[in-house]
Image (spheres, rainbow, N blue to C red):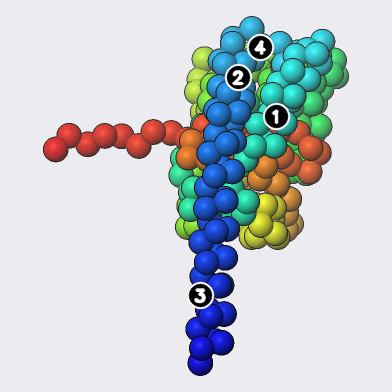
Amino acid sequence: SRRGGLAEALAAEGASLGEALGEALDGVLEGPRGKAKEALLDLLADAAVTREVLRPEGRPTRGRVDEAIKRLESLSPEAEPVYSDLLDGVWDVRYSATTAPGALSSPTRELALFLYSGGFSLGNALYSFANGFWGESLGLKVQGLTVRISDFGRNVESSAKVELAGRTDTLTYTADLMPLSSSRLSEEILQLRLPEPLGEQALPLELRRSILITYLDEDLLVVRHESGAAEVLVRQLAPVRPE
């Protein structure tokens, strides 16, 4: 009918107008977003900053980094990051906020940090332990943290390279991801892989954690775990194959 055709035309026009307004708003935010992103990455590229945030007395520096992260989070281009195709990929952990190590930091404390307040990576627990009394006594160094997300944001494998007594080993855990909302995921950790001779370790109890995705674009991901601490991840560039 003529009335039905008019309604469809108005609906189509409204949808087109909404898309146009969305694109226009995204264009307006692109300048501030780019500046906020550049400022954060420049801050994290400063070796002095990355050392200072791991020290007990580095609270002011951690505050500066968190302010830069919050500024970027307010400009996220993805309204529903949990369902975005951009989530899949291999990510390097550029920053993992950690609880400042104490004088009597212990393996039990860091295990609790990993089990109950970690993000996508092992960084929170490892950095806290490595920079505490026992980690420094043992000469433990964290060399790199990598996160691989696959199957449309439903699976994650996180690995960490650590050096101890001149030997480099890799710690890995795998987990299933389940959407709780358009920006929050539930992570169920399935398995830990420890250096030999320990090898693969199945968890005796079900372990679930909640992760909030606060920023996502083509090459940058920011998540916050249940304690509110943030992780900043940068996408690895795909290798270019010669033709």
First along the sequence among labels 2 and 1: 2
Given residues 60 and 30, the one toward you in this image is 30
Q: Position of residue 203 (x, y in %)?
A: 67, 53
Q: Residue at x 72, y 31 (%)?
A: 70
Q: Which mark is residue 9?
A: 3
First along the sequence among labels 4 and 2: 2
User: Residue at label 2?
Assistant: 39
**Label 3 crowd (10 A; few <14 / some 14-19 / many >=20):** few
Tell me if residue 81 comes above or below residue 67 in the rendering: below
Rendering quarter of residue 65: top right
Q: Position of residue 39 (x, y in %)?
A: 60, 19
Q: Which mark is residue 71?
A: 1
For badge 2, the amino acid type reads Ala
Given residues 84 and 144, the one toward you in this image is 84
Q: Is residue 170 among the parts visible in the rendering?
A: no
Tell me if residue 143 comes above or below residue 91 in the rendering: above
Q: How many marks?
A: 4
For badge 4, the amino acid type reads Val
First along the sequence among labels 3 and 4: 3
With 205 as the anchor, is 193 left or right in this view?
left
Quadrant, the C terminus = top left
First along the sequence among labels 3 and 1: 3
Instruction: Name the front one of labels 3 and 2.
Output: 3
Alpha carbon distance from label 4 to label 2: 13 Å
Q: Residue at x 81, y 16 (%)?
A: 59
Secondary structure at badge 1 equals: helix
Alpha carbon distance from label 3 to label 4: 56 Å
